[in-house]
Structures are given as structure tokens and as C-alpha cells.
Image (cartoon, coloured by chain):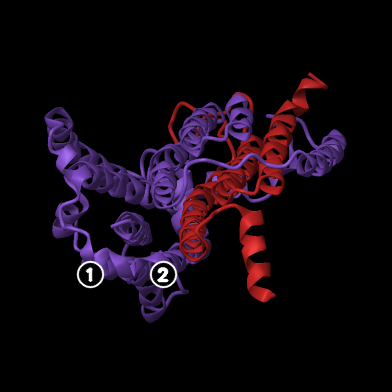
Chain colours: A purple, B red
Amino acid sequence: MVTALAVIRLRDLFAVIMLFGIYSLLSASLFVVLDAVDVAFTEASVGAGIATVFMLGTLALTKSREKIPAAHKQVLPLLAVLGTGAVLIYGTSDIPYYGDPSNPIHHHVAPRYLEGSATEIGVPNVVSAVLASYRGYDTLGETTVVFTAAIGVLVLIGGARRPHSEESPRSDPKQELMKQYSILRLITKLLLPLILLFALYVQFHGDFGPGGGFQAGVIFAAGFVLYALVYGLDQARQIMPPWLLRIGISLGVLIYAGVGVAGILLGGAFLDYGVLDPHDPMHGQHLGIFLVELGVGITVSAVMISIFYAFAGRGR
Amino acid sequence: MQILGLYNYWIFIVLMMCGFYVVISRGNLVKKLVGLNIFQTSVFILYISMGKIIGGTAPILTETATVYSNPVPHVLILTAIVVGIATTALGLALVVRINEAYGTIEEDEIHAQSEDEAL
């Protein structure tokens, strides 16, 4: 919270973004305290990792100082904010208390999921079960949103470079400078396999512990972003070429929707994994969740890496 | 306990208002996006704190635990975070394009330039 206040005051946008990363990490630890381990995982990898890199990428392309806002413009927003806050705080007096098991939220569908998922889905992590199976439609929709956003970013800043970039030499001075930091390069080389391996672990162990396709995709992308930062964009592009990413972006959504259509063809409902294995519905559920999470992981990591390429390639 | 039972909502409101204030009072577009993200995180905290049960554990089924926190908000927020970063990236891409078109990311300077062109 203190960090959030500091974010308001600071005008140096670089410091603002760094503080925002810290703020994300703090809220991730708050989520752990509130028992939401999957959410904390996502927030830590997304907010503190990828979001910071994207924002810094934007700053590199724009300006890093904020103009001092005019004084008369501050009073009206402050009044509006205080007024809204007061109304909201007044409104909380009717809201049920924190952590009380008798709150209405805990009595509608949640007990059904908690009791049913052990026998119907057979996956210990209820969050994964709800995400991929019970509410599979939502997750398909959200994967599609991520997919659409990636298309938007690529259309906006992906393809054409600036016209005057032709005369700039191929090897830029920053990259030459980076070659001198041999410790950074060595550590990156050591860390990269571990990061990628961890991403795969998170991907395939998401049924049993915290994790899943979303987190794994982001961690996988973070590994590549680290590599591209230290070794240069061109080298990263050779390992993971943009055409491969474009295939990956759509392949993930296709896998997800394909699993759903396969359910229909086998005589079930859309995204009904039970029919995938006619002899053992539980095994079918496992298979379905596995494939769907794989699709989510592929899409998310391909989207994150290609957005990073778009930001990094723009400045050349 | 009566008063303290509501403090999670107050934290959420203060954070939300911080984000709201940044969005409406600052002209810098990157700062606005950071404010929007703070706003968004405050909503995440609201949802997650509603799902918490005192004495419960994370919703991963084990043999020892009997009380679990509510998994439904966790699922909603997990996907919301990833969608949030995707939309933030889209916003940042727009900022980059605006900077290329106008040479600034300050709202009032952009307005001034648009009016000049209109005249």
C-alpha cells in the first residue's frame, strides 16, 4: 500500500515501474497468506516479471520523465476519489465479515466443487479442476482474449519498422556493451535450463500442486525474455523464430477448442472430457485437463514472447 | 472483531482509490496504465479475500485438511491476471504508437496537437 502511494508521488517513470514490480511481488505474498497459492504464483510471474519488462520496453520507446501536472487539475480528481472512497467504505458496513465460513459466497457452488472434484475429476488441485473442467468454457474464452490481444499488439507495433531504421547499423552499441558482462552471460546460461525445466514442471504438475498452463506459459516466456535481454534479440530470434511463435499462438487455442470438439464427436458435450476415454471417465478427465492446460501454456508463452519481440524490435 | 472484520475491504478501497486517482489526475499515459493496474490488483485482492476462510488451507485436496478456502474466486482471478497483462500489453502498444504519431505521451500535449491540426 505504501508502495502504491509512492507510485503516485514519483515522476521518474523508471522508478515507478520498478516500484510497481515490488508492489506486485508484495500482493503475491498477500495472496499466499490468503490461501490462494495458484493466484500468487501467477501474480508473481506476471506482475513482477513480465509486466515490468513490457513497461520498461515501452519506456525505452518513449520518454522516462513525467511532466509535472498543473495544480488546479489535482483538486477535482482528489475530491472525486475521496467521495467515491467514502461511499464505498459506507457500503462495506453491510458486507459479511472476513474469513467467516458462514458467508454466502461459501455456500453456493464452491462446496459442490470441493466435494465433487475428488470423485468426478480425480485431480487434487481443485483450482485446476475448476479452471479446466467445470468452468472450461470461461477458460477457453480467456485464452481467446489473450490470443486476440496478441494479434492487436502485433498489428499495432509488430510488423513494419520505422522508416528511418534502414540506415542504422546491424550491431547496436548496447549489445556490444552487453558482451563484456561475462558474469551475467554465464549466470544466464546456468539459469536458463532451470527456468525452462521449472516451467515444464509447473505445466505438468499443475493437477497436483499449484500451477498450470497460465503460470507455466509465463515462466517459460520469462526464461526466453531473460535470454534475449542478455544475448540480444537477434540470437533469441534464431532459437525461437517469430513464425514459430505465430503458429504457437494459434496452435494452443486450436488444441483447446479441438479437445472440446473431440468431446462432441465422441458423443458427449462440448469440453466434456469424460467421454475421451470410454472405459474410465476419470482417466478421460485427466487427459482432457492435460491437453487443455498444454494448449493454454503454448498460447500464453507464445503470446508473451511475441509481445516482447514486438516491443524490443520496435526500437531498432 | 466487529470493526476489524471489515478491514480487508478497506485495504481494497484505499488501493482502488489510489489507482483511480492516478488514472484521472495524471496526464502521462504510462502512469495511467500503472494506475489502472493498481486498480485491477485491488479488485483481485477483494475477490481473493472474500474466498478466504479463517482456519482453512489452500484448495488442494489432502487427507489431513478438512476446511479449504473457496476455489472459485481463485480461478476467476488467475485467468484475470493473465488477461490483464495481455490487455496491458495492448495498451502499452497503443502508447508506443501514440508516441510515434505525436512525439509525446502527455495527454494535454496530444490534445493541443489535435486541436492545432483541426484548425
Q: Quadrant of the C terminus of chain A?
A: bottom left
Query: Of label 2 and label 1, which has the lower sequence position?
Result: 2
Marks 2 and 1 share the same chain: yes
Q: Can you give x and y, in whole percent of width and height, for residue B81 in the image?
A: 51, 48
| Image quarter of residue A227 | top left
| Image quarter of residue A242 | bottom left
Q: Can you give x and y, in whole percent of width and height, for residue A132 in the image?
A: 44, 57
What's the distance in space between the residues labelled 2 and 1, CA to CA? 13 Å
Q: Which residue is nearer to you in this view: A135 or A8?
A: A8
Q: Can you give x and y, in whole percent of width and height, for residue A241 in the image?
A: 19, 63
Q: Which residue is nearer to you in this view: A286 or A192?
A: A192
* Residue position marked by numbered label 2 in the rendering: A151
State the residue at coordinates (78%, 35%). Answer: A96
Q: Quadrant of the N terminus of chain A?
A: top right
- Is any atom of residue A255 visible in this view? no
* Residue position marked by numbered label 1 in the rendering: A243
State the residue at coordinates (47%, 42%). Answer: A64
Q: How many marks?
A: 2
